[in-house]
Image: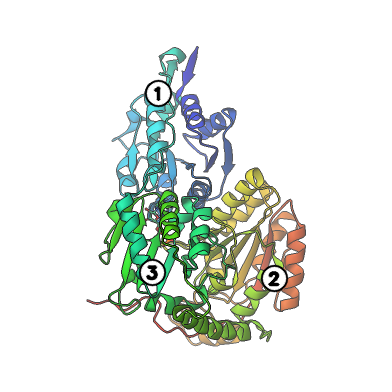
Amino acid sequence: MVTDGNTILAESLKKQGVEYVFGIVGIPVIETALAFQVAGLKYIGMRNEQAACYAAQAIGYLTGKPGVCLAVSGPGLLHCIGGMANAQVNCWPLVVIAGSCPEDHEGIGGFQEWPQVDSSRMYCKYAGRPPSPKLIPLHVERAVRLAAAGRPGVSYLDVPGTLLLGEVDEDKVPELYSAEPVKLAHPDPALVSQAADLLAKAERPLIIVGKGSAYAHAESAVTKLVEKTKIPFLPTPMGKGVVPDESQYCVSTARTQALLKADVILLLGARLNWMLHFGQAPRYAPDVKVIQVDISPEEFHNSIKSEVAVHSDIKPFVEALTHKLDEKKFSLEVAGNKWWQALQLKQKANIEFVEAQANDKTVPLNYYAVFKTVQANIPRDSVIVSEGANTMDIGRGLLLNNLPRHRLDAGTFGTMGVGPGFAVAAAMWCRDHAPGKRVVCVEGDSAFGFSGMEIETMFRYKLPVIIIIVNNNGIYSGFDKETMDDLQSSGDPTQCTPPTSLSSEVRYEKMMEMFGESGHFCRTVEEIELAIKKAVATTDRPSIINVAISPQANRKPQTFNWLTESKL
Ligand code: ADP
Ligand code: MG
């Protein structure tokens, strides 16, 4: 029996445990997608390769098994590059496969010819082109394994049209193994003891829970550590939910203070990059001691020297540490403990400020009032996808996650446009692995614009994503209609239109009318409540809730600038 490259590729992916492929077809990968479906892979056709790439990496983060992004040659692959960089920077597993022009057209101006392997290399852990159909299984095994091994990241496979259509006798294709998952890396016991000693002696200990802990499925181990030791913890944005946000030991509402005053920090699967202010003064005490736990030793001592650097998977380390601290009978007393008292004082003041804002229902609404209403009306176990500047930052504090891997956002790379792709992936994951669970995609109006056409994908696959657009007419903030009209009529629009502005009160919810349905436009808290109730009751298609807020709405004043000033 004769088989071909497409079939071998499809069967190899299936054999390596891949479940989902997100992509856009065209020459030369139409037959490829069909072969994927025949092999039993789930194929989801999207509207832009970038969004398909975001969806595939979100599946990788949610399941631990890389999703595949399938694209056409040249521009198709190049549209994926932003997505590949995002996955690589977030440390999420992803396999990108792109068709490329027939090998005998290479160098003479082939259709959509481009040096695709070279172009991908910077954004990948591994990039290659199987030299013959027979060798496809070997390259697929390698691509899938490398994407997930160690610190997860991206693999790229280049598949020329000639390779995909190349025929070969079935019995000449070597039967390929599928390797067992890598066993968890355990910590050096001496380092566990050092970490335990340091924490036990600390006056103001703090645990930071990063998205590495979420990816590592360390939720029960980390929750147990926090509950036994009563050490305050701070989740990073996507570390939210590893320990429930509603835990009494979560000090997100005193974040600045906790970072500033801690004397020993246990860093569990988070990098001391811009998101954590590099671990440096003025955001931290200059003599803070860090216990850094990471699967990737290249990460150690990156912006400050760690006191203890443990090369380990989060879960076995945390279990060993909890055991050690148990032996020492270590536990903070919350009542009467000075560190806890200082944090609680700060928490109280911050919560009061936010509550006052959130209870202010003046129209046009402010961000806090919108998020309080959203939080009160969505199912509590929803996956929350969030992007936008203020929308994401302010929403992070008010939209709670009590379950791990239930928040997907612009991430370490700060990429806008990820939301709809992430939401498609999350909704597919819910459909197959957590039926009934909902995906709530909270978007700034600017962020939504990058990938809004994926609403059609959500309709085609009947994904009941609840899209909430927090619409302030602009990037960061915009202008009301009157001000915009005045500004624009004062001269040439290219000179007078503020670069941060978007059109006023765009009726994004009317995109629903393209599908014969209607969306929700809201100005008041009551309208938002009603719209969410209707959206939650809609289970066979997406909903759009477009909330017009005050274009001047802003974040509460912060003690420090968002990004600390450069030292150069
Ligand atoms: P956050 O955005 O939450 O701060 P980062 O993406 O900066 O998180 O950091 C996550 C870290 O977690 C990365 O340095 C990565 O190497 C590490 N990591 C990923 N998976 C594991 C794991 N299973 N065990 C330990 N560390 C992990
Ligand atoms: Mg906006």
- Residue 479 sits in which quadrant? bottom right
Total marks drawn?
Answer: 3
Residue bearing the label numbered 1:
133
Alpha carbon of mark 2 to alpha carbon of mark 3: how far?
Answer: 29 Å
Q: Is residue 544 above or below residue 4?
A: below
User: Picture coordinates of residue 447 (x, y %)?
Assistant: 52, 66
Left or right for 115, reference 94: left
What secondary structure is found at the residue carrying circle 3?
helix
Would residue 183 appear left or right of 542 to someone viewing this image? left
Relative side of 362 to 402, left or right: right
For label 3, the crowd category at 10 Å Cα-Cα, with few meaning under 14, some 14 to 19 and many 20 or more, is some
Q: Which residue is mark 2?
A: 376
The residue labelled by disc 3 is 276
Q: Amino acid at mark 2?
A: Ala
Q: CA distance from mark 3 to mark 1?
A: 46 Å
Residue at image coords 70%, 78%: 523
- Select label 2 or label 1 by which is in front: 2
* Amino acid carrying mark 1 in the image: Pro
